[in-house]
Image (cartoon, rainbow, N blue to C red):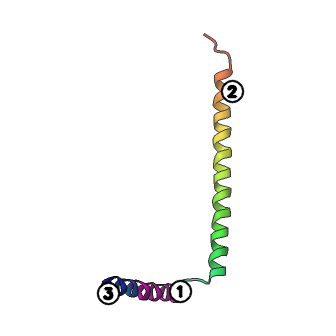
């Protein structure tokens, strides 16, 4: 029983120390971090849409070429 209590006490103290260090060493505030993440997500979404549109145009061009009658 003493071992379990010592383990739980150590885990609790380690968690508190780890959380404190993480907060103190964080490069930006929560609000700034959320704004950066939102901006990156929007940039990624724009890039994915652009890449998808380019690929779609390429595939439509290939499909049109395949539909053209062949001249032998």
Residue under label 3: 2
Q: Is residue 23 above or below residue 68?
A: below
On the image, the x and y values in percent for residue 10 come to 37, 87
Circle 3: is it few (<14), some (14-19), or many (20+) Cα within 10 Å? few
Q: CA distance from mark 2 to mark 1?
A: 57 Å
**Residue 23 forms part of the magenta stretch:** yes
Q: Is residue 53 above or below residue 20?
A: above
Give the CA separation, mark 3 to mark 2: 76 Å
Query: Tag 1 or tag 2, which sits nearer the N-term?
Result: 1
- Secondary structure under tag 2 reads helix
Indicate the quadrant where residue 62 lies. top right
Tell me which numbered mark, 3 or 2, is placed earlier along the sequence: 3
**Residue located beneath label 1 in the image:** 23
Q: Is residue 57 magenta?
A: no
Q: Quarter of the image for the C terminus: give it.
A: top right
Instruction: Give me the residue at 68% from left, 45% from top.
Output: 53
Please name which of the two marks, 3 or 2, marks the residue nearer to the observer: 3
Q: Which residue is painted at 47% across and 88% down in the image?
A: 16
In the picture shown, does residue 62 fall above or below 46?
above
**Marks 3 and 2 in Cβ contact (< 8 Å):** no
Q: Tell me if label 1 and label 3 are in contact, CB under 8 Å.
A: no
Residue identifier under label 2 = 64
Is the magenta region chiefly helix, strand or loop? helix
Crowding around mark 2 (Cα neighbors within 10 Å: few <14, some 14 to 19, many 20+) is: few
Circle 1 Cα neighbour tier, 10 Å, few/some/many (<14 / 14–19 / ≥20): few
> Which marked residue is nearer to the observer: mark 2 or mark 1?
1
At a point 68% along the width and 63% down the height, the residue shown is 42
Q: Which mark is residue 13?
A: none
């Amino acid at each position: 029983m003493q071992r379990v209590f010592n383990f739980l006490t150590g885990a609790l103290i380690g968690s508190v120390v780890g959380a404190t260090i993480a907060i103190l060493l964080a490069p930006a505030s929560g609000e700034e971090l959320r704004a950066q993440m939102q901006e990156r997500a929007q940039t990624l979404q724009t890039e994915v849409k652009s890449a998808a549109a380019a690929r779609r145009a390429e595939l439509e061009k290939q499909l049109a070429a395949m539909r053209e009658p062949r001249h032998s």
